[in-house]
Amino acid sequence: MTRFSAFFLFASAVCAAPLPSVTPFLEQHCTECHDGEVKKGGLDLTALPFKPEERKNFDHWVKLYDRVNKGEMPPAKKQQPEAADVKTFLAALKAPLREHEVAQQTANGRTVLRRLNRTEYENTVHDLLGISLPLKQILPEDTPLHGFDTVAEGLRFSQLQIEKYLEAADAALDAAIVLSKRPVGINQRYSYKNEQGIRKNLDTPVGTLSDKTNPKSGHRVMFRENDKEVIMFTTGDYLVALKQCRLPGPGSYRIKVSGNAFQSEGEPLTLMIYSNNYKQKRLLSYCELPADKSREFEFFARLDGNEHIVINCDRVGRDKKGQNIYNVGAAEFQGTGLAMQWIEVEGPLSAEWPPASVKMALGDVPLTELDDKNRKFRDGKQVGYELAPTNVNQAIASGLNGFTARAFRRLLEQDEAGPYIALAAQSLEAGSTFEEAMRVGLRAILTSPAFLLLEEHPGKLSDLALATRLAYFLTSSMPDEELMKAAGTGQLSKPAVLKAQTERLLKGPKVAAFVTNFVGQWLELRNIDATTPDTKLYPEYDMLLKLGMVTETEAFFSEMLNKNLPVANFIHSDFAMVNSRLAEHYELPGIAGEQFRRVSLPADSPRGGVLTQASVLKVTANGTVTSPVIRGAWVMKHLLGQPPEPPPASVGSIEPDTRGTTTIREQLAKHRDSETCATCHKSIDPPGFALESFDVIGGFRENYRSNEKGDKVKRQLRGQNIWQYKEGLPVDASGELADGRKFQGIAEFKKLLLEQQDQVLRALAGNLVTYGTGAGIQFADRDAIEAIANQAKADGTGLRSLVHAVVQSSLFLSK
């Protein structure tokens, strides 16, 4: 008897299930390299017992299963086992591994108890109270696991978390319970001619006030005016802030602007509208202004009341010769300017007063309006209304019972709201007013475990728990009234009803939260600000381009979801979702306006799918150079669901070369000299090489950009010669996949990747399940993921069909 066979006799004695078919396979094909003497990869199979109850041991056996299943082991240079032997080995190993996890899931469920993440908390409180106050920034950041901040294992409690929940609850109740007099709103049209910063810098004769205010700079004036408008050749905040508009308080506002491009040779300008409180500058909206006539643009935004409105346009103040407004003055300047006729501001907008949030927080309590003779003040504001419950104790009990049921997202057990009512009653007895007592109870509810945690029990979810899971999956908020009604009647778990409710949510406005939160994490779009492109190497990069990058990918996902387009479109599509700024970046002519729309791509376009979208290309690069390793690993992890092993600690990173002396391919060739590195890089690098035709901001390139060596750039940027960088070495986007198939550039690579679209479908199914259930995919879940993918495939592989298949799956319907 060999020592290996003897070991397995021992292992079988101590394991719950023997592995009779595993021993000969491992002995014949694996132990030559993985025994106590050789120990390749640090793995000694002769000393590895089968103890799945130990996490590390379980992971070892799963890894062994996967390597054999993928054909990675035994290595290609070794004698290969017969297909039947591989099948027998995999079946023998899969059964006990799966049985172990299924037993754990049956006892405890796949998902541990999870709390609301901070996005879900904010949305839920907004829906509960009918407010729009931002709350997310009050709470600590959540820790994503398995790629998502909905995964329960990463959503733990801490002392800081509890303190911040109390702070957020107080802020929310302050925003909801508003009993002041109705604020005197504004509804006014403002002219920039009346802004002091502009009046001092209007086109005036040399030697007058404008020059005297800046004697050191010697700059001339930066504005002109005529009978209908002010023409701006600068949009510096300190000059063009709308100081004459004083906001009366927080709330929703309507803002409308009228303007056009001036001296722009027919080219439009993009106007950006911000709010600024001197601490934070926040983009509210933006629009494209034409050159031939003025345009009126209207939008709605929430303002805090302590801000002022600022406009900005970064393409004014310089002509095509590079002449700057500061050196010429407005009178003689021939470059582009911004003509602003007026700006209207109306708000705060409220259909009723006191706002509906008062009733949502306190219940249907009578209100008494106070006249000026009985006026009272609180926090510097005149109180306009008093709460006048007929029976205070009854009003507290009624209000808190109703609020608790909505907050807990289920039917209450008998007297479950009792502790919160008792807290409010104690406060009342201590001398508090009805409102103050209610705040005590409401605050306790908003920080209670039943509100902050999703209540799920092992086994099949109850209809109410299913409603909650479905709502947070597709809306990142609590179930609405219709969903709760379907759950309350016990009908939601019926496949037809569940499908109808899923479809209703997918058609609703709140599905935008699903798009933003899922896509932002699946494709790592939340990292869009992690790096800042080098301004010298990438002078065309600006805020509008960055905004367009993320919006394109979200719009693309929405188009796929709404039209139920096949998942293969994530690999390659014949269309893109662009606006004028992104179309300019992609060199797609004839696209005007800030709105994103579906555009058919030319047959020879390198675009199409998510791989070549600027957002993905930016988050997979640093601000200076691209890395095929990072991009290749991204493709493997996010698109194929096959994340590569992390590099050994002893392997150093590659320093970027911006001088233009070596290409990244040349650097990686040296990096892969060792056999250890070559094994992994054989799979990682090819996708990254295919994407080398795209720079760090997603622009298509044939040459690298260089700070030092290279040729003068022949093309222009917005009508001006490019002097900031040089044309470096040529790009080589060819490669060879691990299986030997070769490609020349991104188009051929995407054709090869389309042959793996089933794997992309499985990977996306796994990501949706992880995001929607709050648990990563386990070994025992793999068959269920395969079933989800097969169901979606039977329905045409549409993205919407895939979402429905996920919701109807056993993984989604169980804890």
Image (spheres, helix red, strand yellow):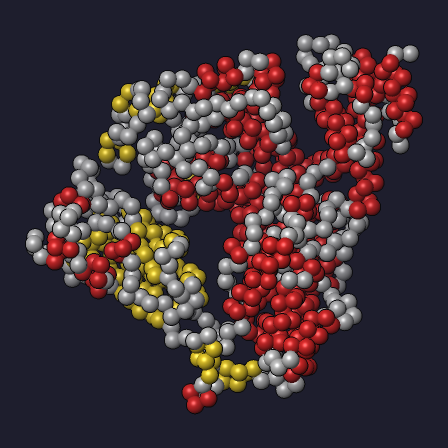
Q: Residue at x 43, y 76 (%)?
A: 380
| Left-right relation of 184 to 638 | left
The quadrant the N terminus occupies is top right
**Who is closer to the viewer here, 533 or 777?**
533
- How far from the left and from the top, in percent, is residue 675? 60, 13
| Left-right relation of 521 to 104 | left
Q: Residue at x 59, y 80 (%)?
A: 433
| Left-right relation of 232 to 43 | left
| Left-right relation of 614 to 676 | left
**Who is closer to the viewer here, 773 or 399?**
399
Q: How many marks?
A: 0
- How far from the left and from the top, in percent, is residue 247? 36, 67
Q: Quadrant of residue 339?
A: bottom left
- How far from the left and from the top, in percent, is residue 617? 46, 33
Q: Quadrant of residue 182?
A: bottom left
Q: Image height check: is 622 above or below 682? A: below
Is residue 233 in sight in this rendering? yes
Is residue 493 in sight in this rendering? no
Q: Image height check: is 114 above or below 735? A: below
Q: Quadrant of residue 267?
A: top left
Q: Residue at x 70, y 16 (%)?
A: 40
Q: Image height check: is 578 above or below 403? A: above
- How far from the left and from the top, in percent, is residue 691? 47, 26
Q: Residue at x 75, y 63 (%)?
A: 489
Which residue is most to the bottom?
373
